[in-house]
Amino acid sequence: MSIDKSKITLEQIKKAMECETPEELIAYAKSEGFDISKEEAEAYLAELDNIELDNLELGKVAGGSCYLVDCDLFSHVIK
């Protein structure tokens, strides 16, 4: 089952990044109401392993991105 990434919170992303095995991620996802397969967990872990998000990027993932304005102008507020 595919996860709607727009429904994932910043806190959930941070906790998912702490998971070290597919089994840990599956258990965590289930505790948050998501049902994922082992293959999906492995793919998500591989994806998470290859990224490091700074505070501005994490804010955008969590729905904090700017609309119709230059976000760089407001980056000092977000940080």
Image (spheres, helix red, strand yellow):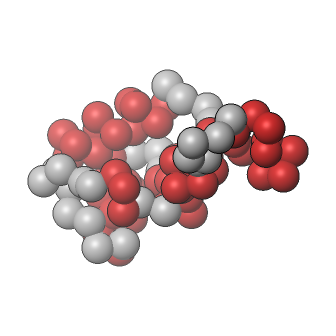
| Position in image of residue 15 (x %, y %) | 54, 58
Q: Residue at x 28, y 45 (%)?
A: 41
Q: Nearer the viewer, residue 43 or 59?
A: 59
Count of marks overlaid on the render: 0
Q: Nearer the viewer, residue 75 or 53?
A: 75
Which residue is situated farthest in the front direction here? 68
Q: Residue at x 87, y 45 (%)?
A: 76
| Position in image of residue 43 (x %, y %) | 29, 34
Query: In the image, 7: left or right of 35?
Result: right
Q: Is residue 40 visible?
A: yes
Query: In the image, 62: left or right of 73?
Result: left
Considering only vertical position in the picture, is 46 above or below 63? above
| Position in image of residue 66 (x %, y %) | 61, 47
**Which corner quadrant of the image does residue 11 belong to?**
bottom right
Q: Is residue 79 visible?
A: no
Q: Residue at x 22, y 43 (%)?
A: 40
Which residue is situated farthest in the left direction here? 1
Q: Residue at x 53, y 55 (%)?
A: 62
Which residue is situated farthest in the top direction here? 50
| Position in image of residue 13 (x %, y %) | 50, 53
